[in-house]
Image: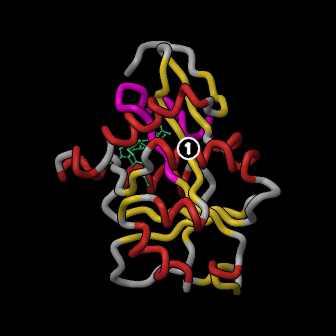
Amino acid sequence: MAGNAPIVIARAMPHDLAGVRNLQEKNHKENLPRERWAEGYISLRTYLPLLGRIREETGIVIAKGCGGVVGYELPLDASHRLEAKGDADVIVPTFLEIGYCGRKIADYNWVTGQYCVDEPFRGTGIPTKMHPEFLEMLGGKFDLLVFIVSKINLRSLHVALNKLGMVEAADRAGRAWKTLVQEIG
Ligand SMILES: CC(C)(COP(=O)(O)OP(=O)(O)OC[C@H]1O[C@@H](n2cnc3c(N)ncnc32)[C@H](O)[C@@H]1OP(=O)(O)O)[C@@H](O)C(=O)NCCC(=O)NCCS
């Protein structure tokens, strides 16, 4: 835990992007032992030029504490995902076919996202603090937020489903990922 450092939720400025990228890299699955994956890991990288584009085009929500970025929640639209490096190119076509409220996800104006909290700051509810700002930022641009979470990532599944208000779209037995969705008002 990081003591009682005050946490400020904000939209990322250009000088915050290196902090976002560092946090992402630290939590990438290649940099974490597998036995820690249940506590959360990331499988998609967004390098600095792409982070810059995401920030300009949609925005990135960050949590700042102790003088730096200690958490972030970022959106990835279709073009961002094409540029991102990771599993998304494999997973996205499969989840697009999944239905939610009688429509395929593909038929919504949907956006995916990624969120992360630096380890010393975990367990203090930072995702719950960032998420309303994140939804507000996406409002008017997209109508469905989709998170694709590995079934191994129990912590992220718990937070997204029980604390951020996401729901599981129809699951497909046997898949390694759960597709969580949330309507954007
Ligand atoms: C997922 C992540 C963002 C959660 O951040 P956090 O600061 O721990 O979140 P919170 O403080 O809101 O809550 C943590 C919750 O997880 C629960 N939890 C902790 N370990 C858990 C586990 N192994 N399985 C299930 N739940 C777990 C805690 O009990 C707490 O729930 P509660 O408030 O209902 O008691 C953080 O773990 C992280 O950044 N992980 C690495 C990156 C990642 O996985 N991102 C998501 C990619 S889909």
Q: Is residue 61 left or right of residue 115?
A: right
Q: Is residue 185 left or right of residue 156?
A: right
Q: Position of residue 110 (x, y in %)?
A: 66, 68
Q: Residues within 10 Å of mark 1 (few under 14, many from 20)?
A: many
Residue found at the very far front of the displayed protein: 49
Q: Position of residue 132 (x, y in %)?
A: 70, 43
Please, is residue 44 above or below residue 87 in the view? above
Which quadrant would the N terminus be assigned to in this image?
top left
Tell me which amino acid carries mark 1: Glu
The residue drawn where x is 69% and y is 85% is 103
The residue drawn where x is 61% and y is 41% is 60
**Ligand 1 lies under 8 Å from the Cβ of mark 1:** no
The residue drawn where x is 29% and y is 52% is 38
Q: Position of residue 124 (x, y in %)?
A: 49, 29
Q: Is residue 31 left or right of residue 170?
A: left
Please, is residue 185 above or below residue 96 in the view? above
**SS class, disc 1:** strand
Boundaries of the magenta span = 114-130
Say which of 111 and 168 sits in front.
111
Circle 1 is placed at which residue position?
73
Whether residue 123 is in magenta: the answer is yes
Whether residue 155 is in magenta: the answer is no
Which quadrant would the C terminus be assigned to in this image?
bottom right
Q: Which quadrant of the frame does ligand 1 lie within?
A: top left
Say which of 79 and 141 sits in front.
79
